[in-house]
């Protein structure tokens, strides 16, 4: 689905010794799977995602989506790409326009791409609201009347409106409490199973990453220090930085002890 090769970003500054924000990042996302980018704040995760979305200009590298280089596409082809790749942001309080009703929020991308008339758009909004576990009666409500978890469900519904193939999820759970995080993770897994979606999941929370990922890419200071199948990376991390991140995950030692007992 997505192949990233040698992706780099060097911001300009009065400082000649400013290190690259992202340097030589390469990974692949297979169809219907989840690849997670993990690392501490400032590791380059979100900058990498912004370059993939063409919201930030890459200094070097290629981003192939279905075999086509996204970074060299013209406006017409880029519009098609933006329809097939959607994003869910970190903070549902900030990503939803408080002036709009839920119907207007979910229908916004449909209007932007001139898909359907008003009746069809409303029907699509109602279907999507139900699909993410919210009642149709909320269509006329505004984000201020919703909980954080409900708002993130609306953000996911909006992202699904154009029937994308890839969702980029940039810290989508960090503003939610643990019980709500679990509900959203379950929803994402359910949607992926039913719709065949691919996910690029960005997070600093390895406990969350472990639950959702097929592949994991660990970034530090703009570079990839380790990547591989999620279970393998969590059970036997090869890099010292990855080991340190894992040592900070709540319950990690307990999980490792259970794995040791089963192995015996």
Image (tube, rainbow, N blue to C red):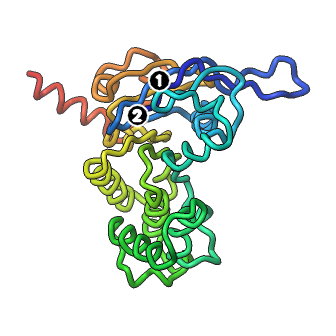
- Residue 175 in picture, x, y percent from top left: 51, 57
Quadrant in which the C terminus is drawn: top left
From the viewer's side, name the closer residue of 81 and 240: 81
The quarter of the picture where residue 49 lies is: top right
At horizontal 49% and vertical 32% (from top left) the residue drawn is 65
The quarter of the picture where residue 101 lies is: bottom right
Q: Which residue lies furthest to the left in this view?
A: 264
- Secondary element under disc 1, as helix, strand or loop, is strand
User: Residue tagged by mark 1?
Assistant: 27
- Residue 238 in picture, x, y percent from top left: 39, 15
- Residue 225 in picture, x, y percent from top left: 50, 18
User: Residue tagged by mark 2?
Assistant: 35
* In this rendering, position of residue 121 left or right of residue 264: right
Q: Does 66 appear above or below 238?
A: below
At horizontal 57% and vertical 34% (from top left) the residue drawn is 45
From the viewer's side, name the closer residue of 26 and 161: 161
Q: Does 61 appear above or below 182?
A: above
Q: Does 36 appear above or below 241?
A: below
Q: Which of marks 2 and 1 is nearer the N terminus?
A: 1
Q: Which residue lies furthest to the top in this view?
A: 238
From the viewer's side, name the closer residue of 113 and 137: 113
- Residue 144 in picture, x, y percent from top left: 56, 78
């Amino acid at each position: 689905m997505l192949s990233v090769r040698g992706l780099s970003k060097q911001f300009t500054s009065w400082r000649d010794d400013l290190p690259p924000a992202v340097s030589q990042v390469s990974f692949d996302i297979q169809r219907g799977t989840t690849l997670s980018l993990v690392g501490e704040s400032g590791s380059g995760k979100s900058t990498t995602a912004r370059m993939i979305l063409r919201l930030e200009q890459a200094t070097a590298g290629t981003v192939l989506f279905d075999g086509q280089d996204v970074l060299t596409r013209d406006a017409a082809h880029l519009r098609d790409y933006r329809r097939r790749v959607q994003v869910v942001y970190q903070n549902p309080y900030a990503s939803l326009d408080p002036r709009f009703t839920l119907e207007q929020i979910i229908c916004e991308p449909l209007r932007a791409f001139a898909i359907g008339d008003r009746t069809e758009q409303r029907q699509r909004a109602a279907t999507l609201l139900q699909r993410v576990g919210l009642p149709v009666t909320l269509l006329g409500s505004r984000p201020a009347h919703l909980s954080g978890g409900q708002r993130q469900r609306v953000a996911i519904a909006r992202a699904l409106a154009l029937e994308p193939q890839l969702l980029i999820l940039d810290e989508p759970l960090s503003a939610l409490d643990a019980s709500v995080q679990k509900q959203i993770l379950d929803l994402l897994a359910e949607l992926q199973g039913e719709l065949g979606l691919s996910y690029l999941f960005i997070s600093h929370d390895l406990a969350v990453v472990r639950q959702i990922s097929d592949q994991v890419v660990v970034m530090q200071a703009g570079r990839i220090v380790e990547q591989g199948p999620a279970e393998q990376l969590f059970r036997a991390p090869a890099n010292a930085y990855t080991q340190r991140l894992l040592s900070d995950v709540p319950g990690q030692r307990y999980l490792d002890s259970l794995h040791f007992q089963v192995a015996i």
